[in-house]
Amino acid sequence: MRILRLLAHMELAVGELAQVLGQSQPRVSRHVRILCDAGLAERRKEGSWVFLRAGIGEDRAPPLGAAAARMLAVAERDDAGFAARCAEDRRHLAAIRASREATAQGYFARHAGEWDTLRSLHCPDAPVEAALTQSLEGPGLGSLLDIGTGTGRMAELLAPRASHITALDKNPEMLRIARARLQDLPAEKIELVQGDFTGLPFGDACFDTVLFHQVLHYALEPETVLAEAARVTKPDGRLAIVDFAAHDREELRERHAHARLGFSEEQMLSLLSEAGFDSQPAIALPGSQLTVKIWTARKHSGTRPKEPATAAGKARKR
């Protein structure tokens, strides 16, 4: 019961649960296994870590899960002893949050020089974020997939307008940074997933909005990546790409692992059309040496999802 009350607040690793509860990791793992087998909790592997999230909630199906969530809330309200235990657990949970934030700050401190060097070449972040928000005006974003979430900044920015956010990144360290940034969002609203953009671990047509923020230039085969994005986007769903216009800064290949030196307008329009998207006018934001562009598009209503050419693209889970 204490584990489920904790998971109602945020996703936690098994080791973090053991730390909060003051129990051995094998004992906590045994309880976690029972909860997962019963469908009350969900287990997710991320690199060498295993994370747990609640499988129940007052706004989640099936009805039994909603009833169980209400029962636990009532138990904490009416049972003084249980309430005291839960309050103590949440105090320990605050220490977990602080530790995550400290880890994130340390990572930023170690890599700040690299990011500052790159940022000095292009438009500052604030105008780019404002332009992206404006380009996605209209009805809410619905279910949002943030591909290559990195530090989680875009997920944080767009969270107020999304019904649910899935933040995906290949790098476990970056996911830990994003988790620290997004930990104050309701647990049922955010899901962090480790995965590769060439083979997204999701079913077809399950997202209303898909975002690539400074990610596509890392793709050796952007056509494969965009085909995957189209596959998981609902008909008439929206796609937004924030990336560099074509440039000649060859040193970015070695210093920052860029596979592509930006995209020309012709290249991007061709890529989007081939993937099954109708493009909208792009926004250009010039910097000192690099121009940031924002491309938005909608998926054709009648487009059938395209199968990626890579074997990795066929290894899907959901």
Image (spheres, grey):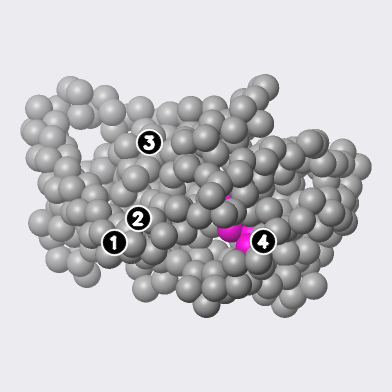
Image quadrant in which the N terminus is located: top left
Give the distance between the C-alpha atoms of the residues marked 4 and 2, in whole angstroms: 30 Å
Q: Is residue 213 above or below residue 174?
A: above
Q: Could you say where residue 145 lies in the image, as x and y percent from the top left?
A: 59, 46
Specify start and end residues of the magenta stretch as a single range. Answer: 213-218
| Residue under pointer 3 | 185
| Residue farthest to the front, as pictured | 288
Residue 112 lies left or right of residue 27; in this view the side is right
Tell which tag, 3 or 1, sits nearer the viewer: 1
For the residues bearing labels 1 and 2, Cβ distance under 8 angstroms = yes
Dividing the picture into quadrants, the one containing residue 226 is bottom right
Q: Which mark is residue 157?
A: none
Q: Are marks 3 and 4 in contact (CB under 8 Å)?
A: no
Q: Which mark is residue 177?
A: 2
Q: From the viewer's perspective, is residue 246 above or below residue 311? A: above
Going by the image, does 307 lie left or right of 232?
Answer: right
- Name the secondary structure under disc 1: helix
Structural crowding at the residue carrying mark 1, measured as other residues with C-alpha within 10 Å and reported as few (<14), some (14–19) or many (≥20): some
Alpha-carbon span between mark 3 and mark 1: 22 Å
Any magenta on residue 215?
yes
The amino acid type found where label 3 is placed reads Leu
Q: Is label 4 in a helix, a strand or a loop?
A: loop
Query: 296 or 116, which is in the foreground?
Result: 116
Q: Position of residue 14 (x, y in %)?
A: 28, 61
Q: Earlier in the sequence, mark 3 or mark 4?
A: 3
Q: Residue at x 34, y 45 (%)?
A: 181
Q: Which mark is residue 107?
A: 1
Q: Earlier in the sequence, mark 3 or mark 1?
A: 1
First of labels 1, 2 by sequence position: 1
Q: CA distance from mark 2 to mark 3?
A: 14 Å
180 versus 175 height, above or below: above
Amino acid type shown at disc 1: Tyr
